Image (cartoon, rainbow, N blue to C red):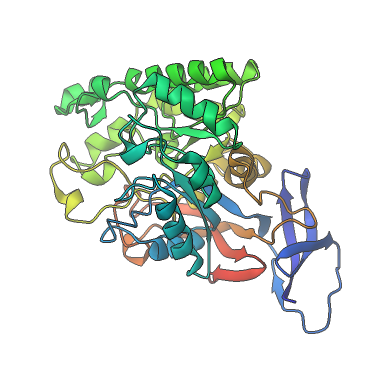
Amino acid sequence: MTRLLIRNGRVVDPSQGLDEGMDILLEDGCVAALGERLRAVKGTPVLDASDLVVAPGFIDLHCHLREPGAEHKETIASGLRAAAAGGYTAVCAMADSDPANDDPAVTRYVREMAEEVDGTRLYPIGAISKGRNGEAMAEIGEMVDEGAVAFSDADRPVSNALLLRRALEYALSFDVPIVSYPMDPDLADGGSMHEGAVSTRIGLRGLPAAAEEIVVARDILIAESVRGRLHLCHLSTGASLDLVRSAKQKGFEVSCDVAPHHFILTDEDVAASNYDPNWKTYPPLRSAAEVEGVLQAIYDGTVDAIASDHSPHHADEKELDFGDAPFGVIGLETTVGLAVDRLLHGKVIGISQLVRLLSTGPAEVLGLPGGSLREGEPADLTLLDLRKRWTVNPAKLLSKARNTPFAGRRLKGAPVATIVGGKVIWQSSR
């Protein structure tokens, strides 16, 4: 039996309403006990968590690990190592590999490759449609049998409304959600940054907020009509979040996540970057007013989770002109630090709500193990140093990619240990 005793930590667990100093005993991969001055069998390793927050393990609801098919950008192994260093005990990998994860054989491959890595857990998200082409439904039931926990065509919205409705209905029988990336490709019309005064001033083609909001509205209406489970990824506008807020008030099973770059950066930052493609995100960095809308939704509880939307690209791809470069930034190793720095130290929310957004909320959205430190729950924990100061240095990241707009940014707060199944899989110096 493996054991680990974590002493003197500040245990923050929203699932139990906990925020107090105590010890945690982990045994055989599960939480065995919580309390003050716990005793353990002689020889049990002890981890001193003095001055640290001890939280249920953080879960990333969506990231892009590229394997199979684009291992020059990221592999499952490198992605999971980066996730562990970012404080994540589990990640959900999107289906936009090559071939797409639209078949149980691909789902099995992804899961088995992750099992070879002694670290962060991986939960595959399967494709809604074959080839992610939005025409014929993929083998949802068979992929569930192989471990898929949700279904999404990743960065391709399901334009066929009837197919989306049928997918929502079919997914209900397996009790899994449909995950939408809301963006109307016709309205987007090749835009590369937020449409507004800044895009006009600097001469880049704009991508309107309505391209996101129209799909959010449509998908919510379809989900409401069949009582389906719908999760909306990386929302970036106040109107999108208003739609989610309204759906929740009506009692529908609609959830959403946001990414750090959408509650920290704006389109003015794109202009100030001198057209640096590392600032090209999907959806694009919005106006300051939209950022305030995202922060308000985080504050009032409309947002269910913070996700990294980790989108690695090779350096050569991000050296193209801004309009031609691919969308996306990496985030597995920066998301937690950015969230602590902006939301907690920026006094947007408190520590309990932050942990909910990074752990308990994601677990609830997809029905995943974890998100709680109750006795008997998986021994997956993230330890945070809220006072640690550090600088984002792309050269020191474990991801294969370096495409981040946060290079050189000074942050306060960071994960310092990641524990999966009662085993410390990553630990930094204090």
Residue 237 in the image, given as x and y percentages of width and height: 42, 24
The answer to whether residue 393 is above or below residue 223 is below
Give the left or right position of residue 55, taking residue 132 as reference. Answer: right
From the viewer's side, name the closer residue of 1 and 129. 129
Residue 23 appears in the rendering: no
Residue at image point 66% right, 48% down = 371
The answer to whether residue 373 is above or below residue 280 is below
Give the left or right position of residue 33, taking residue 300 as reference. Answer: right
Quarter in which the C terminus is drawn: bottom right
Give the left or right position of residue 237, taking residue 119 as reference. Answer: left
Residue 9 in the image, given as x and y percentages of width and height: 73, 61
Quarter of the image for residue 226 reads: top right
Residue at image point 50% right, 15% down = 221
Give the left or right position of residue 298, taking residue 51 as reference. Answer: left
Quarter of the image for residue 76 reads: bottom left
Residue at image point 76% right, 79% down = 44
